């Protein structure tokens, strides 16, 4: 006699339903990354073609979003910040503003590929930290991932993102 909690052997170990639940989130993640890359390239093109001030451009982008969030969040209706929270909030805002300005100047001077890579330099430190201080299981996978990231940063910094500097450029010259 079968128990009411018995599941057929066919469904055991199947994670298809779990993977299917995450699919919309993965699609949103991919679309968000593509929009981020598109916006970085658009910003670079605008700044390099018009010669606009980075500070004014960043300010004109952040101000409307700040107004929208103020209207939606209504911070004046909530609990006010204590005196010990005001100073760190102001310091955090100043550091964030400095980060945006320096990132915009770096984008204008170095181009979009290197600016995007600079954003992910923290990932290298995270992988290095996980390899050195994390669990010792699968250490070769962590070290291999770290080496692959460092190699990709090196090759892209040497100009391999452009077709003429790529080691595979010779293949495009061969006529079939």
Image (spheres, rainbow, N blue to C red):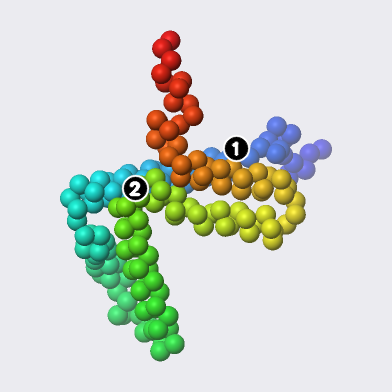
Residue 104 appears at what percent x and percent y?
31, 58
Residue 175 appears at what percent x and percent y?
41, 12
Q: Can residue 68 be seen in this view?
A: no
Q: Nearer the viewer, residue 21 or 45?
A: 45
Residue 76 appears at what percent x and percent y?
30, 80
Mark 2 → mark 1, Cα distance in angstroms:
42 Å
Report the residue marked by disc 1: 16
**Point 66% across, 37% down: residue:** 14
Instruction: Look at the numbered disc 1 and give the secondary structure of its residue.
Output: helix
Residue 148 placement: quadrant: top right
| Of labels 2 and 1, the one closer to you | 2
Residue 70 in the figure: left or right of residue 168? left
Residue 13 appears at what percent x and percent y?
70, 39
Instruction: Look at the numbered disc 2 and give the secondary structure of its residue.
Output: loop
**Point 38% across, 43% down: residue:** 34
Near mark 1 (Cα within 10 A), the count class, few <14, some 14-19 or many ≥20, is few
Report the residue marked by disc 2: 111
């Amino acid at each position: 006699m079968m128990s009411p909690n018995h599941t057929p052997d066919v469904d055991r170990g199947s994670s298809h339903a779990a993977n299917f639940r995450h699919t919309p989130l993965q699609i949103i993640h991919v679309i968000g990354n593509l929009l981020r890359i598109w916006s970085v390239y658009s910003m670079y093109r605008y700044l390099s073609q018009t010669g606009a001030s980075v500070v004014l451009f960043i300010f004109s982008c952040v101000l409307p979003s700040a107004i929208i969030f103020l209207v939606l969040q209504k911070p004046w209706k909530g609990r006010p910040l204590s005196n010990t929270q005001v100073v760190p909030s102001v310091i955090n805002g100043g550091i964030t503003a400095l980060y945006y300005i320096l990132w915009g100047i770096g984008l204008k001077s170095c181009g979009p590929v290197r600016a995007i890579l600079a954003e992910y330099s923290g990932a290298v430190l995270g992988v290095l930290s996980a390899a050195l201080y994390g669990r010792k299981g699968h250490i070769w996978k962590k070290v291999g991932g770290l080496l692959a990231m460092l190699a990709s940063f090196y090759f892209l910094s040497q100009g391999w993102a452009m077709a003429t500097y790529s080691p595979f450029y010779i293949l495009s010259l061969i006529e079939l």
